[in-house]
Image (cartoon, rainbow, N blue to C red):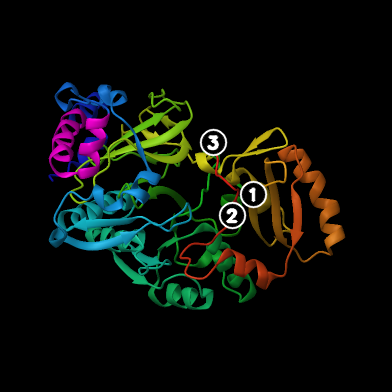
């Protein structure tokens, strides 16, 4: 694949033309090499010769993670001897999916992250500290590592956890950039405050934030982002990606959405009927990968609810920008007549100083409706916490969930179950997840 980094700066018409041609090539490749897509296209009576470009995408069927969970290896388009790396989804939304990458896919992944770090004002003279795992088949850790190397910057692989070791490494190596989960940055701040580390005098100038949203729909910092920046005034860059798409949407310094990489992925935001929505309209993020050799995807519904914007960014990029994730379609909660998404609950709890840690649980009630429970750790007496918290929840959520209080150790065990590589803050124990 010949990468075209300048495409993100060209007019949208040029990007659409490039993607229309790439789509035709992808359809021919899938028809010849993918058992899953060949069968799917046949079942829907699709003649790929009638698909002339991205305007015809709505005539094609969509796919989802459930398809990959059920027919994982039918997505593979190459002999197994071509596979050079196996990665896997985290399994937070059901059975993990294995993604197989060829040498060309690894090269594409490296390029993708190089462009992402460049978008986030990365430079060869930077020193990045990777505060995340590179094991357990975690694609992101490996991708960030390769992307930083391709950028020409230096890096330190410190992994997750251990704030004392993180600060020792930052100060010894003078790391000016970190890659971390935002909630872990709060642990770094807490340690710094307890051990007389002057946060205004550290070498760290920017953070590439993964796994958790930092902004609200208006692109302002949410409660989590504000908590970080209030104590540690560094530049924060949000990212959005998934293992399946093998591509990232990353903010530039303007902080107005994750930039689309048009030479790597076709972006749609669609309604429940698979029809494309216009800029500014919220729907399900749906992607078609370009240049993926091992397991390419066609109209893959991610389950994430976002909108996109197509105005030219102040950074000069003309590519579309993806909003923060409103929520996951499968995680939508209908509670006492109110529709909620977990990120909205997280944002409220993150902004309450007497709530130290939490897990949000949804389960099915005895009458078959959604029931919502907040598992909480607080330094206050339980009665005092309830008296303060319930009016705040009523005001902000318009409903008051069930409350269950735990020790710090118990909450830690809930957030980090055995074999999990991600912190868990939402647990869906409904009998059947909503569609």
What whole-number distance in Å separates the C-alpha atoms at marks 3 and 2? 24 Å
Residue under circle 2? 427
Identified at 18% across, 40% down, the residue is 30
Does the magenta segment cover residue 386? no
**From the viewer's perspective, is residue 16 above or below residue 418?**
above
- Secondary structure at badge 3 equals loop
- Expressed as whole percent of the image width and height from the top left, the position of residue 266 reads 28, 35
Does residue 120 appear anywhere in the picture? Answer: no
- Expressed as whole percent of the image width and height from the top left, the position of residue 152 reads 23, 61
**From the viewer's perspective, is residue 300 above or below residue 239?**
above
Residue under circle 3? 217
Does residue 370 appear anywhere in the picture? Answer: yes
Give the label, 3 or 2, closer to the camera: 2
Q: Is residue 343 left or right of residue 71?
A: right
Q: Are marks 2 and 1 in contact (CB under 8 Å)?
A: yes
Question: Magenta stretch?
Answer: 19-43
What whole-number distance in Å separates the C-alpha atoms at marks 1 and 3? 24 Å
Identified at 49% across, 74% down, the residue is 167
Label number found at residue 362: 1
Q: 10 Å neighbourhood of mark 3: few (<14), some, or many (≥20)?
A: some
- Secondary structure at badge 1 equals strand
Q: Is residue 2 left or right of residue 228?
A: left
């Amino acid at each position: 694949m010949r990468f075209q980094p300048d495409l993100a700066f060209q007019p949208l018409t040029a990007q659409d033309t490039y993607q229309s041609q790439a789509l035709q090539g992808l359809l021919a490749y899938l028809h010849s090499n993918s058992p899953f897509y060949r069968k799917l296209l046949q079942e829907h009576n699709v003649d790929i010769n009638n698909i002339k470009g991205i305007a015809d995408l709505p005539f094609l069927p969509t796919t989802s993670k459930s398809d990959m969970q059920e027919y994982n290896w039918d997505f593979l388009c190459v002999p197994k001897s071509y596979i050079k790396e196996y990665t896997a989804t985290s399994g937070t939304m059901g059975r993990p999916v294995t993604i197989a990458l060829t040498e060309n896919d690894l090269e594409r992944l490296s390029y993708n992250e190089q462009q992402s770090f460049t978008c986030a004002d990365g430079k060869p003279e930077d020193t990045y500290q990777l505060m995340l795992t590179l094991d357990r088949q975690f694609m992101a850790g490996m991708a960030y590592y390769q992307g930083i190397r391709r950028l020409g910057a230096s890096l330190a692989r410190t992994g997750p956890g251990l704030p004392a070791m993180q600060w020792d490494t930052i100060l010894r190596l003078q790391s000016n950039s970190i890659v971390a989960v935002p909630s872990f940055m709060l642990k770094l701040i807490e340690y710094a405050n307890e051990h007389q580390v002057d946060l205004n005098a550290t070498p760290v100038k920017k953070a590439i934030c993964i796994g958790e949203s930092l902004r609200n729909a208006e692109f302002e910092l949410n409660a989590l982002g504000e908590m970080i920046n209030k104590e540690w005034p560094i530049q924060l860059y949000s990212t959005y990606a998934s293992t399946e798409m093998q591509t990232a949407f990353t903010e530039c310094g303007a902080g107005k959405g994750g930039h689309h990489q048009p030479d790597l992925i076709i972006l749609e935001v669609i309604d429940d009927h698979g029809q494309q929505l216009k800029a500014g309209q919220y729907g399900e993020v749906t992607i078609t990968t370009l240049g993926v050799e091992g397991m390419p995807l066609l109209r893959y519904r991610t389950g994430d609810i976002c909108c996109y914007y197509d105005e030219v960014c102040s950074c000069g990029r003309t590519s579309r920008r993806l909003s923060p994730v409103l929520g996951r379609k499968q995680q939508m909660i209908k509670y006492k007549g109110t529709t909620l998404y977990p990120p909205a609950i997280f944002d409220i709890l993150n902004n309450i100083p007497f709530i130290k840690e939490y897990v949000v649980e949804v389960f099915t009630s005895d009458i078959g409706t959604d029931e919502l429970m907040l598992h909480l750790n607080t330094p206050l007496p339980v009665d005092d916490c309830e008296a303060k918290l319930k009016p705040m929840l009523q005001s902000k959520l318009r409903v008051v969930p069930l409350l269950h209080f735990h020790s710090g150790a118990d909450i830690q065990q809930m957030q980090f179950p055995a074999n999990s590589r991600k912190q868990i803050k939402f647990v869906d124990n409904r009998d059947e997840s909503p569609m």
